[in-house]
Image (tube, coloured by chain):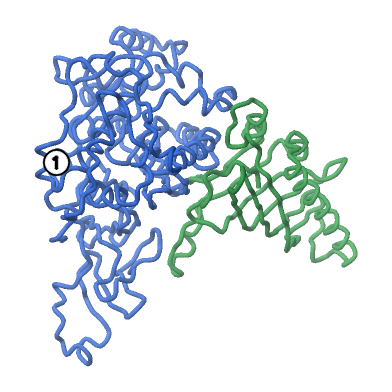
Chain colours: A green, B blue
Amino acid sequence: MTALSEMSMQARMLLQYEVESFLFFEADLLDSRRHDDWLRVLTADIHYWMPVRRTTTAREVHREFTEPGAMAFFDDDFAALEMRVRRLSLGRAWAEDPPSRTRRLLSNIRLLAYDGAEVTVGLNFQLYRTRLNSEEDQWIGRREDVLRREDDGFRLSKRHIFLEQTVILSQNMSSLF
Amino acid sequence: MVDRMIASDRCVDVSACFDPARGVLQRHIFTDPEIYQQELERIFARGWNFMCHESQVPDSGDFFMNWIGEDEVIIVRGRDQQLHVLINSCPHRGNTVCRAELGNTRSFFCSYHGWNFDLDGRLIGMPGEEAFYKDGVDKAAWGLTRAAKVESYRGFVFATLDADAPALDEYLGWVGRLGLDFMLSKGEIRFLDGVLKNRVRCNWKIAVDNLYDWYHVKVSHGASMKLGLFSEESMSPLEQMVILGEYGHGIGGPGISESDFEASVDRLSRGDDTGPWYDARLSERMTDESLKQLGPVGKRSMGHPNIFPNLWITNTQQVCLRIPRGPFETELWWFTYEVLEASVAHRKAVRDRTVKVFGPAGLLEQDDGENWSHSTRGARGVVSKTLPLNFQMGLGRDEVLVDPSGQTRIETVVNEHGQRWTYQAWQDWMMADSWAALKANHTQPPEGQI
């Protein structure tokens, strides 16, 4: 068990580099439509969750996001994510046929916790999508990811997505975050 | 109270937009801005609109925001536990007095000049009441405007802005009530926290039309069917039942024959779970109370109800509201409920499935948006907006059957009766300049050959 605060600056820089390399690679898999390869960087026990966000008063801002177990836009395990990927190859998955063009920009990547086996990462993302001739959507938000160290590198074991939208302003969310 | 409502003299004549005898619809009803304005006045402000479920606002001060057309309303539980529906607009400058989507409050305080309103909408104070107004404001006359009527049906809260509207019970009629009863056959329900909201660039009527559409499923949702999320027989069943009610309410979709129903009862009573997909659905209805509530015809329907104009009751423990945002945009609001008496595991399973399937990221739902927006776009071109749309499936080939109980229905295959009924009702609502005129002139639910 290595607490981040006990690690040397050099060790932290190295870990930061490893984490960023993984996240950029993983984002590129999705941008490149290599969805099957993307599934391979997930752990079998992954939790992929996007709660519903609401406008609340400042006094009740603790109610801004729905709690686990309440409604959510995504609350997927590996099997559900596999379904999302598999549907793309089955024909008649119209939300992605013609395929969307997406680009993922990741920034403000911070290591939040590390225990030697798993590293918790906070980051900001922008997911830009265009479809057909003139459809344009973008989603910006914060993610909390957990990367698990395995023999050949990291795997993603948790992705919690907090979007900066309440009413989703796109016709669907057929992209993966 | 709203004293002067929707009595607009201006009227776009839409009486020839839908030809029920030929099953032909004019496309410009999806795009014409004047028609849209008339819909806000003659359909949304006049009809009973779904507001929320009582379980969303259990305590005094709890509020939830919704819309009646483009009028934003606050649904709030008062100090007396009564539900109030208030138009979210300060009588001083028109500013909104509530900016949150939900919450709990002691009053509604306008952020512009500080006029403050009680939970029932009464004006209870403003800065400078003595010094500037010299106590000269009639506070009783300057509260928030209240919906003309607010009523609940078995926990489902509705409101209308038209004082001449009939009581909710009469408005719903047996078909609207049956649609809502479908959700209660398993016992008391509670709405889950979190309404999924997203915007689709389509006219609201295209979304409503789609809920009766059991023709699109195999094509639009082909990929989801191949995933095995639903069995093919449940998504595109051959046997269909359509129930048409007064003022445009309807139920359309799978329905089974009396003999198949009896066979289900037999299988379920023997604990045989190898039967067809609908056994699971029917098993929820097997209490004496539920069977009595649904009636001999209703108990055999597994279709989609629509409470006119825009409340779709799904088969997946959800209701979906289609809120107009101009002729070219619609907001979809997905509310999800759970049955209180169900086991924790069952409640979780239903909720997990709902998250997976519906809402903007839902495996099923994500494929609809583009079809609907492009259908709307197809009504915009100089030529394309003049081209008629075909609503002829099943036209003139079916018969309305009447049960001894009085319940009516059409038993047939995949069809467009529900859509035709919706546009017929839409036309009636749009051509009536008052509730009196609508009551006198609306099309009665069909009889005989249809």
Q: Quadrant of residue B387?
A: top left
In this view of the protein, which residue sits in the foreground, B443 or B230? Answer: B443
Q: Residue at x 57, y 42 (%)?
A: A75
- The location of residue A130, given as percent across then percent down, is 63, 48
Q: Which residue lies furthest to the right in this view?
A: A10
Given residues B196 and A150, the one toward you in this image is: B196
Give me the residue at 58% from left, 37% from top.
Answer: A95
The reply, left or right, for residue B137 in relation to residue B111 is left
Q: Which amino acid does label 1 sit on?
A: Leu
Relative height, residue B281 to residue B42 (above, below): above
Q: Position of residue B123 (x, y in %)?
A: 21, 73
Q: Is residue B246 above or below residue B438?
A: above
Instruction: Measuring from the top left, give residue B227's x and y in whole percent.
Output: 59, 25
Residue ID at (31%, 79%): B114
Above or below for B191 versus B135: above
Q: Residues within 10 Å of mark 1 (few under 14, many from 20)?
A: some
Quarter holding residue B343: top left
- Residue found at the very far bottom of the displayed protein: B131
Kind of element beneath mark 1: helix
Spot the residue most to the front: B383
Write down the residue under mark 1. Answer: B438
* Residue at mark 1: chain: B
Quadrant in the picture for the N terminus of chain B: bottom left
Q: Which quarter of the figure has residue B340? A: top left
Residue B364 against residue B275 in the figure, above or below:
below
Q: In front here: A11 or A34?
A: A34
Residue at image location 23% in from the left, 25% down from the top: B289
